[in-house]
Image: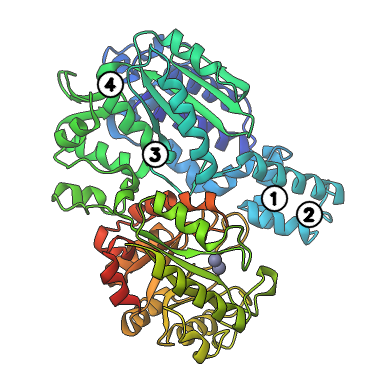
Amino acid sequence: MNNREIAAVFFEIADLLELQGVAFKPKAYRKAAQQIETLDREIEEIYKEKKLKSIPGIGEAIAKKVSELIETGKLHYLEKLREEIPKKVVQLMEIPTLGPKTIYFLYNELGIDSVEKLRNACEAHKLAPLKGFGERTEENILKGIRLLERSRGRHLLREAYGDAVPYLEWMNKCRAVEHASIAGSSRRMKETIGDIDLLVTSKDSEKVMKKFLAYPQVKDVIAHGKTKSSIRLTDDVQIDLRVVAQESWGAALQYFTGSKAHNVKLRQIAIKKGLKLNEYGIFEKGTNKQIGGKTEDEIYKTLGLSWIPPELREDRGEIEAGQKGRLPKLVEAEDIKGDFHLHTRSSDGTASIEEIVAAAQKMGYKFITISDHSQSLRVAHGLSEEKLLEQTKQIEKLNERLDNFRVFSSTECDIKSDGKLDYPNQVLNQLDFVIAAVHTKFKLSEEEMTQRVIDGISNEKVKILAHPTGRVLGQRDPYKINLERIFEVCLDTNTFLELNAFPERLDLNDVNLLKAKEKGTKITIGTDSHSLTHLRYMQFGVATARRGWLEKQNVINTYPLKEIEKMLI
Ligand SMILES: [Zn+2]
Ligand SMILES: [Zn+2]
């Protein structure tokens, strides 16, 4: 275990003891944790030299616990504490308006063990009648919950990525920078991101830090050190920069890219091979000789794996696949030949078809799909039957003029709550194909919603089911639907599932994409663009597809135009 991990154990013990109202001890554990976290060498080495007690703040009792952690990777004392207090209760300590004594009292009195339960209890005024509580306490706690949620503020991939890429370019302009990379969840392209991690190698870390802090959009400097600094940007995104040694570049990149679960498994493999893996490199256990870590590739190879693309590093089977040399060959941005979901200014978009065609051709695309909203979706200016048919004729004419490029005429047709489509068949039959979607009545039972969607996609003309779970990140949870059933029906009816690339949607998500792939259901990626700038959201679609293990053949956007025409029309 490295310093950071051991420190985390003692921070947790301190929290748990504090919750139980234990005096003094929490402070001692916290002090020890801070000492360990900021040591300039590995605590394992100090342990081997039997000098643990030379570390300030570490006495007999804590030294014993450190030894146990290093020798067994576990700590009996912590496990016992965890049995007494669930982890979720500890998380309540993050609420700024709530003290540990109150948390422990509410846990014992009302069984409140999560933020959700606490919120419900306050809203139902279950606290006010308790001794020492009142309505003001409830209000105060609710206020704290809101504060916590805001400060926790995860950012959409689009926002975080939009910050990370230019910052990286800025750092690359610094001559003292040798290598530079984004790490963390932004490198894994997760749908939402907390802080952004940047990594750099340099012989002159001072110069690098200076450059880092001089970035024009820096609002606050949170921490400024020799090898690590943190800032907050004007849009409230936090960015951490670490300068690491050249010979540790690959190890650090691997370590700080995560995920945690992925890294835990890698370390277990290292241990089995008599090796030690940490953020500094990969070492022989006995001699401590570094045998790898300059590149990520070296780390994975030394452990007997192929290099694993960051998007896969979630411990969802990628390590086992890497050991067998059976990693998927993931779809890439360059494979994409067109976009399957676009709105024009005829409904709620801002661009004309011609403008979209020009932009798409510039991107090297071979096709686009015009899919404005259907008539009953009045808030989005859904097209009347006449208007839709007019648009179809316009597209027909446009296609005659286009060379080596095709505009598909379609509609994002509402599946109404009774499962009926929003246009009659004689209208739908005039289009190249139909995209069906749910935009209303999200609260049906799973049974009802599944049947509604099945009814919709069973129409022969429907070839794509758009944003299949309806979730909107930070705003709306997915509706209840039996996706397994939908996958099957898609196979039976020759329908494809959309990966909606709009950053608030990313629907299907990574986990569901992998399930769809395993079932054999193919995917279309659509940006759901409402303006020309949205076309570039395709990159987030591709990233999510990669996180879902999709290969070129799983994604229809990569097929030659002739084949797409055969499959959809
Ligand atoms: Zn939609
Ligand atoms: Zn749409």
Residue 248: assigned label: 4
254 with respect to 508 (left or right): left
Residue type, mark 3 in image = Arg
In terms of sequence position, does the residue under pointer 1 or pointer 4 come before the other? 1
Q: CA distance from mark 4 to mark 3?
A: 18 Å
Pointer 1 with pointer 3, Cβ within 8 A: no
Q: CA distance from mark 1 to mark 2?
A: 9 Å
Q: Pick whichever, 152 or 416, lies toward us.
A: 416
Report the quarter where the C terminus lies.
Answer: bottom left
In terms of sequence position, does the residue under pointer 1 or pointer 2 come before the other? 1
Residue type, mark 2 in image = Leu
Residue 187: assigned label: 3
Pointer 1 with pointer 2, Cβ within 8 A: yes
Which residue in the protein does label 2 denote? 127
* Residue 154 screen position, x and y as percent: 56, 43
Which residue in the protein does label 1 denote? 106
Pointer 1 with pointer 4, Cβ within 8 A: no
Q: Is mark 2 within 8 Å of ligand 1?
A: no
Q: Secondary structure at mark 4?
A: helix
